[in-house]
Structure formats: C-alpha cells, structure tokens
Image (spheres, rainbow, N blue to C red):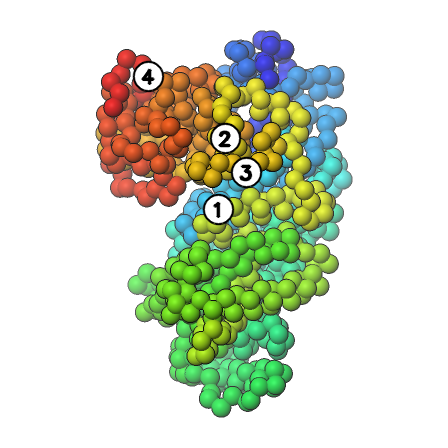
Amino acid sequence: MAAAGFSKDDEVYVFYRMTKRCLPHRKYFAVMDPRQGSYRPRTGVSDGWVPARVVEVKGDDVCVGYSWPYFFTQRGHMADSSSGWTEWYGAGDVRKATGASQGARFPEPATQPDLALITFRWGGFNEVIAPGQWGETGSSVSDIFIDSFVDMAVLPKLGNNFEVWTVYVEDRGDLAKLADSAHLIFGPNHPAMRAKHTCAMYHLYPTGFEENCVPNKETGEDGGAALVDSKSLFRCIQAVERAGIPTRFPHPSGFYELLTSKRWTYMMALTPSLRVPPTIAMPRMLIERGCAFAAKKGMLALQSVKNQQAKLRNETKPVAPITKGVAKLGYSWEALDVKFWEEENGLKEAIYQLTQTIEISQEITGQPHDLESIIIQEYCKHDLELRLYVVEGKVESAIYTKFCRIKENLEFGDFKELFDSKEAAKQWMGNDTLALQDGERQCREITDQWLVWVEAQLAEQPPAIRFDFFVGRTGIAGQAQVWTLEICELGFSMLGAKDLPQKVFRAMLRSMLGESQGAAESNAPPQQAAIADTERAEPVGQAISEAIDAAAGDSSSAGAADEPDEDLPVPPQFLQIVIPSKNMTEDQLVCAGKYKMMPRREANGYPIWEHVSRKRWLYYGNDDFWYVGDEEELRLKFDCDQGYIRHEGEEFTFPTALSGHWERGPDWTPDPVIVVSEDGKPRKDDDASKGKGKAKGKNKNRK
C-alpha cells in the first residue's frame, strides 16, 4: 500500500503495538487519562489505533509524531510528549483522521473493532522469565505468550481491526480495587465495550502463598513474578464476569479455580472410569493437631479410598497396604510443592515440610500459605507420562515425558520429553511398543470421558485443555495400566510441539468471536491481503512461497490447495540468535534473542524474521547474504545489503541450516561463536566494545 495519500502535518491514526515499539524494560501504553497511568492498577491500550501527525513520507512508509500526550509504563513513568520523538510506520498501519476523528481524540471516535481484549497481566518489579520447557510461545503469564497469540491468530484473521487493553496487576491490593469497581470501570460506557466482541484474559498465577514470601520468591528464575493471591484473583475475575465481560483465557472463574486448586483430584477419585489415583484432602485443622496424627489419619483414609475404588471396579480388595505416595499443594506450578513419601513416617515429614518449615536454598523458612488442606495421593508405579493436548474436543498432539529421578529433597527432577512413541517405548518401556499403544488407547478413551465432565462444568467445550496420564506396564507383554495425573488449564506448556501453538491460538480466537468450534479458517481481510502483496519486495518461485505459507499456517496462498515440494525445507517459525559479548558492540548485542517469522513478508525471495521484543530483523539481502538489521533496513524495505551480522546465503537454505561461520561488522570478521538456530544456547557475557559495528556488504571480501 503506497503512502502517496499522506502529506506532512496530516492528522492520522497509527496502529501502535507496545511490545513491538518499545524496549523490553520500558514499555509504554496509551491511557485515556493521566491518572490511569499514575495510579494503580494502571490500565490503557497496548495494541490499537492512536492519534499521530505525519512528519515525513518516504515511499511506502510514513514517519509520524504521536499526538496523544498520555503514554505511561507499567511502573508509572510517563513519556515526554514534547520530546519530538518520531517513528516510521508502514502505510498499512496508518489511516487519515476524518470527521469526528480529527483533533487527536482517543480512542478514535465512530470506530468499532471486531475484537477488544482486556488483558490482566503482571505489573510488578520483577520481569517474567519463562522456563524453556514452556516452548516457543513462552509461559502463559508472559508478554511473549500474548504477542504469540496476536501474531499467530488475531492479526492473520482480523488485520488491525482489534484492540488490546492492558490492566497491570502488582498484588492483591490491585485485585481488590478491581473487584470492588469492575462494574464501574468496565461498564457499558468503557471504550472496549464498543467492539463487536469483548472478552477478558488473565495472565497471572493464583497462589495460596502470601505474596512476596520466600517460597514464592524462590520459585523459578524470576522471583515469583506473576504469582498473586488466589482468593483475590478469583474475586476479581468473578466481578469482571458479572460486569458482562466473559473470560476467554484461561477459563471461567469457577472452572479455573477447580483446576488450579487441584480439588478435582479428591472429588473425582471415586469415579472409577476416570482412573484418578487414590486421593484425599487432609484438612489443615487436623494437621495443626500434629503431623504424626495427620499422617496416621491420612494413611487410613487413603486406604479406604483405594479399597472402595477396587469395589467399584469389581476388583479384588487390595491385600498390600499403601506404602508410597505424594503430598502436594494446590495452586502450585512447575511441579513444585510435590513431595514423594514412603511409609507413615515419610508422610509425616512431607506434611511437615508442606505446612510448617522447609529448607529452601540452604535456609530454613516457614510455609506461609492459607490453603485449607493439602492433597495426599498414592504413588502409582509407571514408566512414563503421556500428555494429550486437546483442541476443541479433539486430541491434536501427544508428548511423552518423564521425571527421571527423585531428588534429595523428595521432589521430582531430571525432566525429559520425547515426541516419538517408538522412541519412548524403547527408552522407558523396555521396547514394549504394544504396551504403550494399549496405554495410549486407554488414555484417549478416558479423555473422552473427561471432556464430558468438562462440558458439565462449562456448558461448552473449552478451546483447549491438556490431560496428563501415567502409563506403566502390567507385567503382561502388550498390556498397560494408566492413571489420570493432571488436568492442565488452557495456556499449558506446549514444550517443543511445532504446530500446536497455532492450532490452540486459532481455537482461542474462534471462542472469542463466538464462532463454532472447528470452523474453517477464513482468509486474511482484504486490507491485509493488499498490504501483503505490496510488501513483498519481489516475486519468488511458487515452491518456496508455498513452503513459507505452510510454515506460517497461511491458507490464503494461491497455491495452498497443492502440497509443497516434500524436498523443500520448511522455514522455522521461531529461531534464536546468540551473540557473545566479547568483541561485540552494544548495537550488535541487541541482535541476540528470539525471532519470529513475519507472516506474508519476504525480502528478496526469502522470509523475514522479526525480533520478538526489539527492533531487529533477520532478512535476505539483495547481494545474496543474510543480514540482521534495524529500522534503517526496514525503511529500505530490505532491498539492501547491510546490517550488524551476516552470512552468505545458500540456495533454498534458511538461516538455521547455513554452513560455516556468521560474520560481524564492520569488517565482516568470521565469528564461530555467533549462533543462529532454532534452540541456540546463551553464552557468558563479557564487556561490549564501542561503536555500532554495522556495515554494508558491497565492496567487502566474501567468503
């Protein structure tokens, strides 16, 4: 889309995306009133159309200065509206202000987005760091997850006709304010309610622990970021739902609370066909009478449940007593707060550690949580765990996992994952492939029953949900025994499943738009298709175009009806760049991190990857080299040969599969420690050198 229709000083609206336009540590969102950015909980538009004024037009790009004066960070810092800051936008992300829209009004009058998302996300001091096992989309509380959903599902379908309103939550105090005033804040006159569809998303972890306590702080690598008081969170969600805004991520309040509290485990233990291990709830009031007393009561109750399970299944009453089990806390994440125990004394110690004091990082600390009970289960002998990912009522993916050891602190560790059933049977089931097949068949049948139970809680099927099972050999070749281990809410860890995130995100979007589950994917809106056509720097061969569209999940390609060439490599959706700090400039260091392939964008016949949070792009230059560049190359529409690092191209080869070393500017020195791969590993940082380190490719010696 050419920018010829724009002139200097035109009043326009630009489609602003906070995480794409700002530094990771300083993200600005537009608020309607400065008090909404100064006082907690802070709320405003992080993705949407904001008023601006044209400063310069060059080709298909428009340089603007923002007209709206109220941009704040989650910490309450305000952007200086008189700083003269300008930014470049593609013509497809700019539209003229007309009629009532003139005069820098925000939100833009007389507009109706197809979708308004109200996202409740973490606003505390510590930043969310997602463990690697969450996969390429990050954890469900991270900005990476939210952006992945928008990039993979919302943008391809709706174009720029949507908004994301962000509400930053720091602690239970923010949640209490929201719960008390949700009907006032998000009433019918809130701008988000003008959209055709409005829904809420909650990117926070409920916890039974006091906020900012030592056990929370020691959780993960981010000091307990996004962990908030469970009672306050669910009270807030319920208040927003009562205001008429449905929860579409992860689940409505009641069901989300049932899953995260893990209360379903002991509630459903006596439904024999669901294969829940013998499970009980041990009330805190009994524990406070003494851990030994609670352990004795727990062993008796657990045995009663096991005996009744056998009776309901018409099995012989168990002769051997229960000797092994696990004790766990509700609202617990990342397999923490789960203790293995043996015999009654082991259970007593597990109860003590979960409710009284525990050693964390070689320090003794208390357990300040308000959970009314802890969960006690029999330990079920098994060979592996089977994770079944269900999207719109259909199993879409199966992953085989295992915690391979019990650590000294009696928690489970050494997590492994496999994606091939034969390999899983070989490594973990004595190569008894038939037993694994039998176990998987049983798990799928039980999943069908669980889905009916889920529908009974929600009156509909959720977009996605995950069921985890224990699978173990029985001693008879080809036969397996299974147990339901966990039910994971939407937003679950997708590990390394390549095609799963897009399926899940598209199902989420369909639920938000009120579409029937499994509805056929519609093409991108006309304005997006026009943008896509003009943004391609030059036509490419049909085969590689189809490979790019297939990797992006784009069904709108002209050749989408035909299968791409099987011998043609498929570009990765995501890749990682690792930059060692030694001998690197600060600008070169910014090139490091995670990149996502841009939908329907190509440069010189190859796809473009965009950094998920910084202004860096990996593109194929017009001199047959791959480069990582910045806004300068973006303005040139990547019809150039310059950047911070580069690598000579190879025909039909994408950056993660290139042979030889990448080179760093300005002298294009080969550097063997620069890594561009799908799963690059970080290296230890040293001091960065000075200067930009950028260079052009022309007149330089090529390898």
Q: Which amino acid does label 1 sit on?
A: Lys
Tell me the CA gap for discs 1 and 3.
Answer: 19 Å
Under tag 2, what secondary structure? Answer: helix
On residue 498, which mark appears?
1
On residue 563, which mark appears?
3
292 or 132: nearer the eye?
Answer: 132
Circle 2 Cα neighbour tier, 10 Å, few/some/many (<14 / 14–19 / ≥20):
some
Q: What residue type is labelled 3?
A: Glu
Work out whether mark 1 precedes mark 4 in sequence or the reverse, and give the earlier one.
1
- Residue depicted at 32% across the width and 20% down the height: 694
Image coordinates of residue 315 in percent, x first then y, are 57, 86
Tell me the CA gap for discs 3 and 2.
Answer: 9 Å
Relative vertical location of residue 625 with respect to residue 612 in this rendering, above or below:
above
Relative vertical location of residue 620 with respect to residue 660 in this rendering, above or below:
above
Work out whether mark 1 precedes mark 3 in sequence or the reverse, and give the earlier one.
1
On residue 543, which mark appears?
2
Relative vertical location of residue 517 with respect to residue 48 in this rendering, above or below:
below
